Image: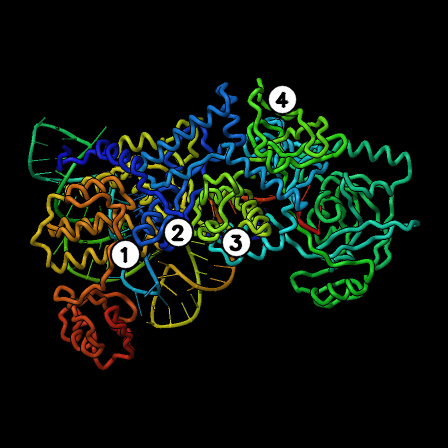
Amino acid sequence: MINNLEYNHKEVENKWKKIWYKENLYKTDSYSTKPKFYILDMFPYPSGVGLHVGHLKGYTATDIVARFMRMKGFEVLHPMGWDSFGLPTENFAIKNNKNPFDVTRENTKAFKQELLNAGIGIDWNREFDTSDELYYKWTQWIFLKLYNKGLAYKKKAPVNWCPSCLTVISNEQVIQGLCERCGSMVELKNIEQWFFRITKYIEALISDIENLDWPKSTKVSQNNWIGKSEGVRVKFKIKDTKEYIEIFTTKIETIYGTTFIAIAPESKYIDLVKDKEKVKEIENYIKTVSPQSEIKRKKDVKTGFDTGIIAINPINKEEIPVYISDYILMDYGTGAVMGVPTHDERDKLFAKLHNIKSREVVDYKKGIVVYGKYKGIAIDVAKSKIIEDLSTMAKKTTEYKLRDWLVSRERYWGAPIPIIYCKKCGEVPVPEKDLPVLIPKDIKDYRPKGTPPLASSSSFMIVECPICSEPATRESKTLDTFVDSSWYYLRFIDSDNRQSLGDEALFKKWLPIDFYVGGDEHTTGHLLYSRFITRVLNEEKIITINEPFTKLRHQGKMFGPDGRKMSKRWGNVVSAEFAEKTYGADSLRMYEMFMGPLSQSNSWNTRSIIGVRRFIDRVWRLQNIIDKNTLNNTTDYTLINELVLSVSQNIESGKFNVCVSEFMKYLNEVEKIGSISKESFKKFIIVLSPFAPFISEELWEVIEEKYSIHKQLWPKVTKVIKDKTNTYIDLPIQINGKYRGNIKVLRDLEEDEIVKMLFKNLKFKDKIREENIQKVIFKKNTIINIIFNDNKV
RNA sequence: GCCUGGAUGGUGGAAUGGUAGACACGCUAGCCUUAGGAGCUAGUACUUGAAAAAGUGUGAAGGUUCGAGUCCUUUUCCAGGCACCA
C-alpha cells in the first residue's frame, strides 16, 4: 500500500498509466451528442533521438485544454499519429543500417510509450502513421484528385537540388539557400518534376487568413512568403526591330530615371542578340553564373554583360543599353527590370560597376516627382498619369513570390506517385481500384543515388497499362512528406474507414480543428500546404470547410541547460524519460507550464523543477489535513471558489504558467489555515487534474471516490459570497497621484465617508488639509486619489 | 535592408490604466536533524536609516492622464523570420 507521508511517483504513475490505457479512458465518441471540441498537436516525426522535454511542452498544453474541455462537458477529440514517411526516418534508417519499415515501428512505439508515461490523454484507437498502407492509399487518392483537376502536373524547370540528400526539394524546404534537413548548399537543376498548382488559390490564401485566430507573426510571415506586389509591366522597344523587352516595376514613377535594362541569364530575350560573336561571349558569361543557387551569387558584386542591344524608353524615347546580369531572377516578374540607379540599391551597385550614368527623378521624402513631365506632382498622381501616357506599352499587374509546390522526390521512403507511363496511351493515372500503389520491399539498396530507388525494382516498375493492357512502366518518384501531413488531421476523424478518405457526415460534425498547437517553423510549409489541400477537398465536396485550423498557437523552443539548442552534438539533451524518472511526470508537466507563456522559448533549468516537485509533495500531504468540521468555514469556501474561477479563466486564455502559481498560492493559504474541507479538497484535485493527472487520480482514490477523476465535471463557480470575512477591504490611498498606504474600510463605502475617515486617520491627518482639496478621484472598492492645490503634502 | 516579437530583481517570470516585482528558483539568518541536495520559520528591487519611514525604480527620451510596466511619438539594444522578389 502506498503510504501517505511520501509521494511515490513511480508507483502511482505505473499503476494509473496501465489502467488508463487498458480502459481507453480518453476514447472519443464520434457520434456523441455533446458539443464537439477538436484539439490537435502537429504530429511528430518519430525520429530515433526519442522524445525530449521540449516535445512535451506543446503536448502538455493541449492535454490540459483537452481535459479541461472534457470536464466542461465537451466531446473532445485529441488524437495522435506519426509523420513517419520522409527524410528524418529514412536518414535515421540509413545511418543505423536498418530498414525504414522497422525503424518506423520501433520509433513510434518508443514515442507512444513516452506520451503514455507523461500522462498525455490520447484516444489511441485513432493512431496511424503516414507510412501505413491504409493511410497512403488516400494520400495517393488525393494526388489523383488533383491530377484530374489539372492541379498536379509535370514540368521541366530549374529546381532546388540537395547534393547531400540526393533529391529535389521544394522552395519551402530551402532556408537561406541551404537544405532544411542537412544544411547543404542547394543547387539549381533543370529537370522534370511534379508540381501542385497552389498558385491557383493564391488570392484566397491571402484573404482568408485575415479572420483566423492565429499569431500575428505567423499570418504576416505567410503573407510575406506569398509575396503579393502590385506594379506595372512596361514594354521597351528594341531599336531598329519590331521586338520588345517587357519589364516589371512597382515604381513606375521612376521610369524617367531608367538608364539601362537588365535581364536574367536564363531570359528568352537573349535570342534578340543576332551578332554571332556577341552570342558566343554571352554564352561564356552565362556559364560563369548559371545555373547555380542564389547563395552562390555574391550579393555585393553584381556581374553583368553588355548585350549590345539598344532599348528605347517608351516615356521619353531615350536610347539605353541592355545588360545580362546575375542579379535578375528569372522566375519573378518578367525576368527583366528597368535599371534606375538613383532609386534602387541593386541597380545603383550594378551601374557603379559598369559605369552607367544615373539621374534623380523622385524625392521620396517630399513625396513628389522632381524630373520630367510631372515635375512637382505628387507621386501617386504621377504614377497614374505615367501609366496613362504609356497607354498600350504598359499594363498594371500583380506579381507573387509563391511558386507551385514541388512534390516529387528521388527518394525511397514516401508514397509512390500513382502514375503509369504507356508508350501508346502516354501518362495514365492509376485507377482508384488499384490503390494503394505499394512501396516495393524487394529493393536491396534503398539509399538515395540521385535517381529514384524505386526504379531499381522491376516487380514495381513493370506494369500493364490500365487502358490498353500493353506493358508500361510506373512513375518511380515518391511524394514529399508534406503531402502526407497536408491532410492527416482529416483522417483522425474516421481513421479506420476503408471505403473512403472519411465519412462525410463525420467530417461535417468534427471539422474544423478548434485548437492547433505546434512549432512556428511550419508557417510557410505545412500550414500553407494544409490550407491549400483543404480548399481543393472542399471543391471536391469531400469536406465543407475552407480553413482547417481555426485557432493556432506555437509553443516556444526548449533549449538545453546551457542555453543552446538541444542536440547530441552539445550533449545537452534532457530526455523526457530522465525528467520523469527523477521528478515524476506531474512535476515535469507542471514545470514545463510554469516556466513561462507557452509561446516563449526557455532554457531547461534542472534546479527550478525542484520547486514544482515540492509543490507536488505538499499536495500529497494535504490529505492529512482534510477536516470534516471545516465544511461550513466561509474562508475555505471563498478560497476554493476563487481558485476555480482563476484557473478556468487562465486556461481559457492560455496562461498555464499563471494557473500553476494560482495552485501554489492556494496551497500556501490552506497550509496557513491548517485544514481543508473535503468538498474543497475534491474541487482542488479536480481542477489540478488536467495539470497533474497522476497524483490527482491517486488522491481521488485515497478519498474513496469512484474512478475516474478524469470523468468528473468541472466544478461550478458560484459567485463569491459577501460574508463577514469579506466586509472589510484594504483601500489604497493616493495623494497627488502617489501611493501613500492603505486604510481598512467597509466594502462599498462611499467617497465622502472615506475622505472623512482620512482626516481622522493617525497616519494621514497630519499630511493633509481639508480646505486645500482640489479634486478627489474615487473608484469604489478600488482606489481613492486626493489632489491638493498646494504641493505641501 | 524589410517584417514580427521582446526588454520588469541575482534567475524564470506576475501585474482588466489604479499598492510594480505575485508565484517559484537561488541566496541570507535561525530552528530541527547523526546527516542533508529533506522539512519548518523569518528575510530578500535599489539608496538612506537601528527602526519607523523617506527617496528612486519596469532599456532611453518625450507626451497623454488625477494616475503609465501597460496608451501615443521618437530612439537604443536583443531575439526570430524573410531577403538580389525589381
Mark 1 and mark 4 lie on one chain; the one further toward the N terminus is: 4
Q: Quadrant of residue A589?
A: top left
Q: Give how far across and how far down residue A709 sits, in percent.
A: 24, 45
Q: Give how far across and how far down residue B28 sits, in percent.
A: 18, 39
Please rate how many residues cluster around mark 4, counting C-alpha atoms within 10 Å: few if below 14, some from 14 to 19, many from 20.
Answer: few
- Name which residue type carries label 2: Phe
Q: Is residue A616 left or right of residue A73?
A: left
Pointers 4 and 2 within a single chain: yes
Question: What is the CA distance from the residue labelled 4 to the residue labelled 2?
Answer: 46 Å
**Dot 2: what SS?**
strand
Q: Is residue A113 above or below residue A541?
A: above
Whether residue A341 appears in this view of the structure is: yes
The chain that hosts pointer 1 is: A
Q: Mark 1 or mark 2, which is nearer to you?
A: 2
Question: What is the CA distance from the residue labelled 1 to the residue labelled 2?
Answer: 22 Å
Residue at 61% across, 35% down:
A169
Question: What is the CA distance from the residue labelled 3 to the residue labelled 4?
Answer: 41 Å
Mark 3 and mark 1 lie on one chain; the one further toward the N terminus is: 3
Label 4 belongs to which residue? A459
Asked whether disc 1 touches disc 4, contact meaning CB atoms under 8 Å apart, the reply is no
Q: Mark 3 or mark 4, which is nearer to you?
A: 4
- Name which residue type carries label 1: Ser
Question: What is the CA distance from the residue labelled 2 to the residue labelled 3?
Answer: 16 Å
Label 2 belongs to which residue? A37
Residue at 14% across, 56% down:
A636
Label 3 belongs to which residue? A545
Label 1 belongs to which residue? A646
